Each structure stands twice: as structure tokens, then as C-alpha cells.
Amino acid sequence: MAASLLRLARPRRAILPLSALRPPLSTQPLPQESSSSNPRRGLPAVLSFLAAAVAGGTTATVAFCDSDGHGHRVGGKESTELVVRGERKRVPREFVEELASFLGENLTVDYEERSFHGTPQNSFHKAVNVPDVVVFPKSQDEVRRIVMTCNKYEVPIVPYGGATSIEGHTLAPHGGVCIDMSLMKEIKSLHLEDMDVVVEPGVGWIELNEYLKPHGLFFPLDPGPGATIGGMCATRCSGSLAVRYGTMRDNVINLKAVLPNGDVVKTGSRARKSAAGYDLARLIIGSEGTLGVITEVTLRLQKLPSHSVVAMCNFQTIKDAADVAIATMLSGIQVSRVELLDEVQIRAINLANGKSLPEVPTLMFEFIGTEAYALEQTLLVQKIAAEHHGSDFVFVEEPNAKQELWKIRKEALWAGFAMKPDHEAMITDVCVPLSRLAECISVSK
Ligand SMILES: Cc1cc2nc3c(=O)[nH]c(=O)nc-3n(C[C@H](O)[C@H](O)[C@H](O)COP(=O)(O)OP(=O)(O)OC[C@H]3O[C@@H](n4cnc5c(N)ncnc54)[C@H](O)[C@@H]3O)c2cc1C
């Protein structure tokens, strides 16, 4: 059965008009008036600027990514910034004209907008350049035309989802075109009996779960708030529920992507089981926008658990806490979440939230299932924790109390900022087998 289709609305930054362009090679500043309040009126103004510049004998290329005059300066002598270097490419003027011919107002060369898209919000990485153009396609066909135009003019492409990635994924070190997928956010079909949903890449996981909740279903991947399904596929993301439901690799049934030459590939049917042919979905998942632009994804859904319990326990050492996580797994208990916070993180949380949690290594668990099953698992883990010097084991079942506890974990990053307000975060992911976790944390500290 297919449920009714829904187009989710998410506010996005206003697209600044083309007329706000500050052309680095032009000696003629563009008239700014009126068009900034009316993007539609701005378009012809810029196109005529572009045409005039070509006719006026200036070179037929523009380097919008030039930092000169815009204060986009990173790195340099004495700098500790992690700078991603790149070539300073020149973008042909007719390239921008060609894009504008079918994208209309959904294209901008405004410096602020390009700089915003070229500066990661959650990463300490910086790039020497920003994108030359930011485009907002509304359909797969527009993505295809953008990619083919970029191919024709040999201009680099950076797809852009929720920009929550933490290692400089959305930087544009060579300039080029940033393809912002925020206008492609339609939930195309929900198949309740098959427990799957077909979505466009700009749909966020939080919005998707709001949509699914009345149907008793949810999508179990929860990376950064604001992350989109396209970006989540491209990063092969996980989340706090990965221990139970796996990563993006395990939760995508098929996808569609526009390849660099403009071809569209669909990687399979909605059937759960198939051994026919190459597993192209798994190749594209995790490819970070390098193999193609994802334009549609079919996701596997899960039933909302009828009951859950959230538990917290303190330990004297990181090793004790890690040993409990290992012993829990080995005992066959299926936790849905397990997270470790060290004493420094707990101090940050106390400072940011006015709490007085014991500042020691702390484990957080979630157990789901029927009420009896979730409680039984909780008590078993309580026993394991006691055998590893665990203390103050507490658990909650009331929805608000559970939400409050997980909020602490989800906002741990911002709590860190609160502890050192004049500092920048150096966020990264480390992946080690569980048996090496305690060692990894000790060495890092
Ligand atoms: C507070 C916080 C907590 C987080 N927790 C987790 C966590 O628990 N687990 C985890 O894995 N990650 C986590 N992250 C990181 C981040 O949320 C994930 O990497 C997420 O998958 C990125 O999705 P996005 O839409 O923001 O992608 P973006 O940051 O916009 O892009 C990421 C990459 O995907 C590419 N891309 C985007 N859209 C497309 C598309 N349609 N087609 C092809 N390529 C595309 C981009 O070019 C880029 O290379 C966290 C981040 C924050 C800030």
C-alpha cells in the first residue's frame, strides 16, 4: 500500500540574487538596487553584465572563488589552521550563463552565499577557495543538466546536503559548483507493508521521522541534527543506534545517482533480497560525492519500539566502562544504544547544563522491546556493571526523563564549546574494534 505523498517544507537560507555579484574582473560595479529584494529581477541584470563583460573585451573567464577583496583568507605563516589547498580555477562566463538558462533564480554567485557554502559549519578544516557558483536543483533532470554542463566545461562539483559533516567534506578547494540539494526534499512514496520509503536526497532524518511517527515506523540512523538522506548516504553515516540497526550501508535498499557523465543509474529494485549483479548501492554509499550525485533513495524502515529504558552508570576508569560494553555484547544482550562519556565530557555537560553529575567515566545505555523484555535486559546489564566496579546505576522509563538524558549526549559537542568558549573544536571520528576502545581513549588523552 502506498501512503499519500508529502512534500516537507524546511526553511532554507534565502538565495541571494545574481545581481549581488561582485565581479572580481570587472571595472564596472553592478547596480545593486531593487534586485536584492526581488531575485527574479536580478537574473537578467547579471546575465547582461556577463554578456557585456565578454563584449567589452575582458577575458571570458571569471574566478569568483578569488579571495581578493572578500576577506576569505585562511592559513598563512604562523597559522595553525588545517588548510586544504587547491588550484585556482577560472570559470568560463558562458558556463554560468548556461547554468542560469535552465536554473533561473535557483543559482547564485553572491559571495556571502558562496562563502557560506564553502565554509564548513562543524569542521576545523578550511579551504583556500570557495565555490564559484551555488545551484539549487529542483529535480533529477536539473541535476543531470548541471552535471553535464560541469562536465562540458571541466568544472569541479561538490554536492551539498545538511553540511553537518565534520571533516571538511563540503569544502570546495578548487572552487567549482556547489550543488545544494535542499530543494529536493520530497517523500515520494511510503510502502507500509514493505516497510520502506522512497525519498529525495534533501529530506532530513528528523523530518522523515516526524512524517513516519503516525505510521508507527522510524528510520534508525541519527547523525548530526540537520543531516540529510543524501549526505548520510554519501558519508555512510551511523549514529547512536548503529549498534542495533547498523549503518547507512545496511539501511539503504536502492538509490538513484547522476554519474559524472550525466547518466542516471538506479542500483536495484525494492526487493530486500537480490544477489543479481554488482552491489552498486554499496559502492556509492560512502563515496562522499565523488562517484555521482544521489537523487533518490529507498530506505528500510523499522517499527517504533513499544517500550524503551535509558540507563546510566559511573565507573572509576575508562577501562572498566569499556569492559562492561564488551561483556554486555558478549552476553548476547541487544542494546539499542551504548555511549561512553569521559570525565572531561561530563564536566563540560555539568558546566553547560547546570548539572552536578559525578565527573567520572560514564556509560549510557538504551534498551528497547516489550516492557518486560527491556526491563529484563536493563537489570542484566546492571549486574554486569556491578561486576566491573560500576556505581550509581540509574534507569528511567518516563518519556521526558529519557529525552532529557539523551539530550545531554546529543548536545555534548556544544557543551564542549561552553567549557572553552574561545576555542575551536577539532572534531574527528576514530574507529577501533571495541576491544581496543579503552586503549584508544587513553592514548588520545
Ligand atoms: C552534533 C553532530 C553529531 C553527529 N553524529 C554523528 C554520528 O553519530 N554518526 C555519524 O556517522 N555522523 C555524525 N555526524 C556527522 C554528520 O552528521 C554525518 O556525516 C551526516 O551523514 C552528514 O550528512 P549531511 O546531509 O549534513 O551531509 P553534508 O555535510 O552536506 O555532506 C557530506 C558529504 O556528502 C556529500 N553529499 C551530500 N549530498 C549528496 C548527494 N545528494 N549526493 C552525493 N553526495 C552528497 C557531500 O559532497 C559531502 O562529501 C554528526 C555531526 C554533528 C554536527
Image (spheres, rainbow, N blue to C red):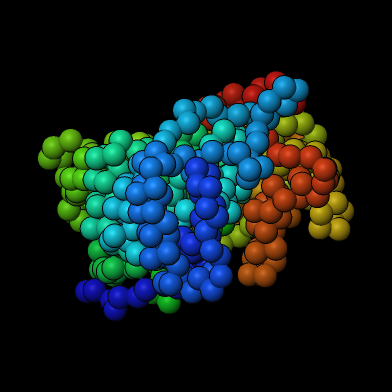
Give the residue displayed 50% in from the left and 34% down from the top: 173
Q: Exactly how many numbered labels are in the figure? A: 0
| Residue at 69% over, 47% down | 413
Asked if 175 appears above or below 199 in the picture, the reply is: above
Can you see residue 171? no
x, y percent for residue 293 = 32, 47
**Residue ID at (29%, 78%):** 4
Instruction: Identify the image quadrant of the C terminus.
Output: top right
Q: Residue furthest front?
A: 56
Of residues 364 and 386, which is closer to you in this image?
364
Give coordinates of residue 133: x percent, y percent: 43, 49
Residue most extreme to the left:
276
Coordinates of residue 185 in the picture (x, y in percent) = 38, 65
Depth order, front residue of 366/385: 366
Front in this rendered view, residue 256 or 142: 142
Picture quarter with the N terminus: bottom left
The answer to whether residue 203 is left or right of residue 389 is left
Asked if one can make out residue 309 in the rendered structure from this viewpoint, the answer is yes
In this rendering, position of residue 431 left or right of residue 359: left
In the displayed structure, 238 sits above or below 83; it is below
Residue 319: image location, x then y, percent: 70, 28
Q: Is residue 140 left or right of residue 17?
A: left
**Which residue sits at x=45%, y=67%?**
42
Q: Locate residue 161 relative to residue 324 in the image: left or right.
A: left
